[in-house]
Amino acid sequence: MKLASSFTIPAAADKVVTLFLDPTTMSSCIPGCEELVQTDETHYKGSLVNEVAHVRFKAGFTAEITSLTMSENSAQPAVVKAVLRGEDRRLGSTIRMDATLTVTPQGATGDTSEVSYEFELGIRGKLGRLGESVIRRRTAEVEKHFAEALTAICTGRPVPQSGKGEGDKKLRAVPATQPVDSGGLTTAPVPQPAGAARFAVAPVEEQPRQNWLVLGLAVAASFAYGILVGGRKGGRR
């Protein structure tokens, strides 16, 4: 099964890249994402807690980088390809996904970015019997939440959370202690309410570009797997 779509984020590409570098930020954007860590230069692993038909479970995945195309200037996109493998033994399901993630600068001033993805999915077990229409519908739901959450973080607004109960609380994006200059977009510290979740992101210049591409692919991988295992964090137990 092939899935492809894109969405626009109101921030310069390098600022989007900076946010992709922060696992805490990404975990808040991906419904059900509980873990996202790098194991070596080209591998990531993660886990998601979700529910299918009101049954909560935890599924793990790994992502391996297979191809990397660096952008040579600010007008060119960066493209990364990788293979995702995931398994949930409780549901007796496995997934393999060949994924491509692209971040492209947009607008005359480059103050917006297009994030696009292409997934080639192979699913076995109970998840494979969900049906293409169900998977495509969940794709739209998870994409919508991811784009809204990332947009909120970029603009300093509360991050909408999926699920019920505690999952409904709003997390407020807080800039790093020092202002971060992201291609002309500078964020300065602002007062935030007590208990707000803090997103302290290092400047993109301090991060190897290969690392953000690997993390970006890991985000795409967990995003795709989140589509398949249900787009809600929390809910009934």
Image: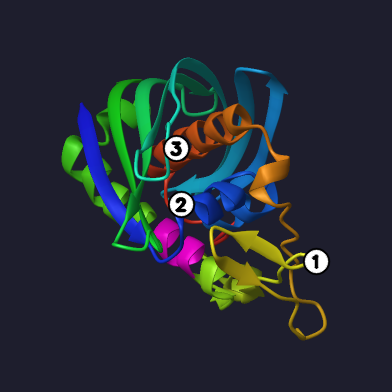
Dominant SS type (magenta): helix
Locate residue 85, reporting x and y percent.
Answer: 48, 19
Q: Which residue is mark 3?
A: 220
Locate residue 169, reporting x and y percent.
Answer: 63, 76
Q: Which residue is mark 1?
A: 178
The span shown in magenta is 144-151
Residue at the limit of the structure toward the top, as seen here: 66
Quadrant that contains the C terminus? bottom right
Q: Amino acid at mark 1?
A: Gln
Quadrant that contains the N terminus? top left
Which one is nearer the viewer's eye here, 93 or 5? 5
Residue at the limit of the structure toward the left, as seen here: 133
Residue visible at 45% across and 27% down? 70
Residue visible at 45% across and 42% down? 223
Q: Is residue 148 magenta?
A: yes
Locate residue 64, reporting x and y percent.
Answer: 53, 17
**Label 1 to label 2: alpha-carbon separation:** 20 Å
Q: Is residue 142 magenta?
A: no
Which disc number belongs to residue 13? 2
Q: Earlier in the sequence, mark 1 or mark 2?
A: 2
Compared to 234, does 81 lie above or below? above
Residue visible at 42% across and 38% down? 73
Mark 3 nearby-residue class (10 Å; few <14, some 14–19, many ≥20): many
Residue 146 lies left or right of residue 34; in this view the side is left
**Label 1 to label 3: alpha-carbon separation:** 29 Å
Compared to 186, does 206 lie above or below? above
Which one is nearer the viewer's eye here, 202 or 136? 202
Q: Given contact means CB atoms under 8 Å apart, are the residues at marks 3 and 2 in contact?
A: no
